[in-house]
Image: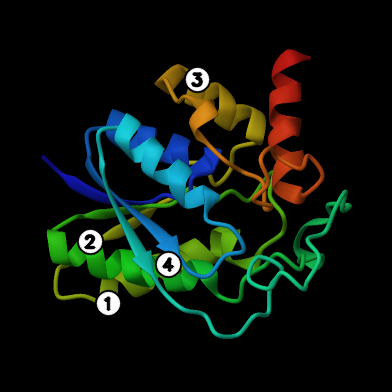
Amino acid sequence: MKKAVVLLSGGMDSAVTLFIAKKIGYKTSCLTFNYGQRHKKEILFAKRLAKAAKSQCTVLKVRLPWKKSALLDKNIKIPENRKFSGRHNIPLTYVPARNTIFLSFALSYAEAIGAKAVFIGANAIDFSGYPDCRPKYYRTFNELFKKATKLKGIKIITPLLYKTKEDIIKLGKKLGVNFNLTWSCYKGGSKPCGVCDACRLRSKGFSRQLS
């Protein structure tokens, strides 16, 4: 059975990505990161999602000593009700080169277990404007994948890259994703805040489902 590493954050995009990988026949190994984010709730949800998908989940702890993000430094206020304006408005929640770091670890993991694919739930339609969520970034990184390892043929698969949040939710429902097992909010409260980028994009997707 072909193997894949799935980057699993605990959010709904990565949850749907995991179930896509399962649907098309991959034996999935999930990789979740404890990178010093301001709350660990998403890690708990990632573990629950992996269990629901009958997939192994590895939580990798890494330390980013530079606190140049609202997701790393509790002294930086998480933006609320921010106006979305795409590539020219990168928010304070951007973590410098986070996806590059995560994909590098995922590539190492994939080569170690003989996996041929790394799945990531990146999205370039309904997203916060992070530079490492754009199509050109993944095209370029895939070229690096071809040259960086002894095991050839490992590729990045981004099944949600051009989908809206509404499309992602529809697809997730078809695949049997339990969205109650996902956490999107940038804050770690007892319930989602409803005003951060992640909450608003999630709410937007579900609202479209009802319209």
Instruction: Label 4: state its secondary structure.
Output: helix
Crowding at mark 3 (Cα within 10 Å: few <14, some 14-19, many 20+): few
Label 3 – label 1 distance at C-alpha:
37 Å
Provide the residue designation for mark 3: 173
* N-terminal label among 2 and 4: 4
Q: Amino acid at mark 4?
A: Phe
Please, is residue 123 above or below residue 206 in the view?
below
User: Are circles 4 and 1 on residues that touch, CB within 8 Å?
Assistant: no
Please, is residue 201 above or below residue 103 in the view?
above
* N-terminal label among 4 and 1: 4
Q: Amino acid at mark 2?
A: Ala
Q: Which mark is residue 102?
A: 4
Task: Name the front one of labels 3 and 1.
Answer: 3
Q: Which mark is residue 147?
A: 1
User: Are circles 3 and 1 on residues that touch, CB within 8 Å?
Assistant: no
Q: Quadrant of residue 204?
A: top right
* N-terminal label among 2 and 1: 2
Provide the residue designation for mark 2: 110
Crowding at mark 1 (Cα within 10 Å: few <14, some 14-19, many 20+): few
Q: Position of residue 103 (x, y in %)?
A: 40, 66
Instruction: Label 1: state its secondary structure.
Output: helix
* N-terminal label among 3 and 1: 1
Q: Residue at x 87, y 53 (%)?
A: 82
Instruction: Label 2: state its secondary structure.
Output: helix
In depth, the one of 58 and 206 nearer the eye is 58
